[in-house]
């Protein structure tokens, strides 16, 4: 995919922030996937839904970077954030009972579903900041750099690889049916 002419005239701060959003979303998916593979932390059904929400968020940023900035792409980011936030809020509420240790391991003292809630809220704030900076940079146009185009290609490749890996692991874990509530093994690798 080539960047369209409109992208070459985006304010550099807007293009950079969309690219950082894509890399940030990829980092979230990579950490979750690494814990799954390295620590045997199989994602529960709600965890899988949160990952799907992050894929939607990442797709919005990716579309802005590769196809061109559009309000519908930001709507994807915000919708993905809202859905991910609601799903993670549900999972947080399931583990609020006294004595409940929560599901899975923690990272810096918080469970991954708590991090997902914080990331979803943070993404909404990030997009709001992006809009403010975009408005402030109105009228500031420069040619898109070769470096930015190369980084967008890397971002696309990394994100696509993470989506494919997560999809494959989900199929291996759940098969064609519903996933177990507290998975302990890959259903198709038994």
Image (cartoon, rainbow, N blue to C red):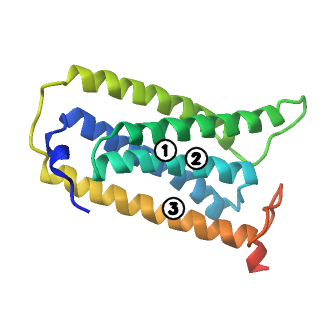
The residue that label 2 is drawn on is 53
Q: Secondary structure at mark 2?
A: helix
The residue at which mark 3 appears reads as 163
Residue 185: quarter of image: bottom right
Q: Residue at x 48, y 44 (%)?
A: 57
**In this rendering, is residue 139 above or below 65?**
above
Gap in angstroms between the C-alphas marked 1 and 3: 12 Å
Residue located at (55% from left, 29% from top)? 121
Does residue 166 show up?
A: yes
Give the percent coordinates (x, y) of residue 78: 49, 35
The structure residue drawn at horizontal position 72% and vertical position 47%, both measured from the top left corner, is 105
* Residue 123 location (% of width, % of height): 48, 33
Residue 147 in the figure: left or right of residue 63: left
Question: Which tag, 2 or 3, sits closer to the chain's start?
Answer: 2
Disc marking residue 57: 1
Q: CA distance from mark 2 to mark 3?
A: 12 Å
Residue 169, image x, y percentages: 63, 68
Point out the image quarter for the C terminus: bottom right
């Amino acid at each position: 995919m080539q960047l369209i002419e409109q992208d070459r005239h985006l304010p550099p701060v807007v293009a950079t922030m969309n690219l950082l959003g894509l890399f940030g979303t990829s980092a979230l998916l990579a950490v979750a996937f690494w814990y799954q593979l390295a620590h045997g932390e199989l994602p529960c059904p709600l965890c899988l839904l949160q990952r799907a929400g992050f894929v939607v968020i990442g797709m919005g940023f990716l579309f802005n970077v590769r196809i061109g900035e559009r309000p519908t792409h930001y709507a994807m980011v915000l919708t993905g954030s809202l859905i991910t936030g609601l799903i993670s809020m549900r999972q947080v509420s399931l583990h609020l009972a006294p004595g409940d240790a929560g599901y899975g391991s923690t990272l810096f003292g918080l469970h991954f579903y708590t991090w997902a809630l914080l990331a979803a809220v943070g993404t909404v704030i990030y997009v709001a900041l992006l809009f403010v900076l975009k408005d402030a940079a109105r009228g500031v146009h420069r040619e898109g750099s070769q470096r930015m185009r190369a980084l967008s290609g890397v971002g696309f490749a990394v994100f696509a690889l993470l989506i494919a890996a997560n999809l494959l692991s989900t199929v291996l874990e759940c098969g064609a049916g519903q996933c177990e509530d507290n998975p302990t093994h890959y259903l198709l690798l038994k």
